């Protein structure tokens, strides 16, 4: 596969993707695999048999691991074993409605889970780049007609949005 601007950037690189069983993570894993990356995915089980991860058979194309990002010991073990060069962090509790039902788990996953990933990145010398993926929900919802800008206030009125705003603020203190 040749994609203008991406030729050989990922070819032969060890790339770890958290949340590879989710919608965005499964597509990213496919794309990276097609670009020649050695993809290591870490995630919980997919939600259903109709998920893109299952329908596209992502697990057969990559090193497919199950694990909870809140488990710092497990994350460090995975990073030590696979020595990724690039990390894409997409794992999250991604559902606004569910965040009202399980607010503590939402914060634990989206905030503390991200801290565990950032710590694993910091402790793994092979990692050259960490890309932390978030959502527009990390910004305070002002019902504007234009898109959000990075200088807009973080946070939101539901546990999911608030947790994603907090998660985004974690990136600055980690080198």
Image (tube, rainbow, N blue to C red):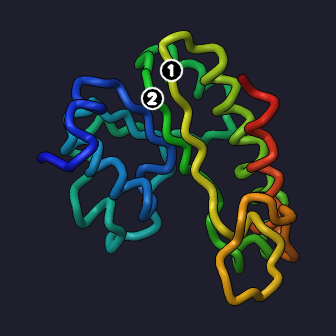
Give yes or no for contact between labels 1 and 2 (Cβ–Cβ under 8 Å): yes
Name the residue tied to disc 2.
86
Comparing 61 with 67, the one in front is 61
Mark 2 surroundings: few (<14), some (14-19) or many (≥20) residues within 10 A: many
Where in the figure is residue 143, as x and y percent of width and height? Answer: 77, 88
Relative to 73, 129 lies left or right: left
The answer to whether residue 162 is above or below residue 88 is: below
Which comes before the other along the chain, label 1 or label 2? Answer: 2
**Identity of the residue drawn at 55% across and 18% down:** 77
| Numbered disc 1: secondary structure | loop
The answer to whether residue 66 shows anywhere in this view is no
**Identity of the residue drawn at 48% across and 13% down:** 126
| Numbered disc 2: secondary structure | strand
Name the residue tied to disc 1.
128
**Identity of the residue drawn at 33% across and 58% down:** 27
The answer to whether residue 46 shows anywhere in this view is yes
Where in the figure is residue 4, as x and y percent of width and height? Answer: 21, 48
Where in the figure is residue 141, as x and y percent of width and height? Answer: 80, 79
Residue reaching furthest left? Answer: 1
């Amino acid at each position: 596969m040749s994609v203008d601007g991406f030729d050989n950037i990922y070819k032969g690189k060890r790339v770890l993707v958290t949340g590879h069983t989710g919608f965005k993570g499964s597509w990213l894993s496919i794309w990276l695999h097609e670009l020649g990356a050695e993809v290591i995915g870490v995630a919980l089980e997919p939600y259903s048999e109709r998920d893109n991860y299952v329908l596209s058979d992502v697990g057969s194309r990559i090193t497919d691991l199950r694990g909870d990002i809140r488990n710092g010991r497990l994350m460090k073990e995975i990073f030590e074993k696979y020595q990724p060069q690039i990390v894409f962090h997409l794992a999250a509790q991604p559902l606004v409605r569910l965040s009202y039902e399980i607010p503590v788990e939402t914060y634990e996953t989206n905030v503390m889970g991200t801290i565990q990933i950032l710590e694993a990145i910091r402790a793994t010398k092979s990692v050259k780049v960490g890309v932390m993926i978030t959502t527009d929900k990390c910004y305070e919802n002002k019902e504007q007609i234009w898109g959000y800008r990075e200088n807009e206030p973080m946070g939101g009125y539901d546990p999911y949005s608030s947790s994603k705003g907090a998660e985004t603020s974690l990136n600055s203190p980690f080198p």
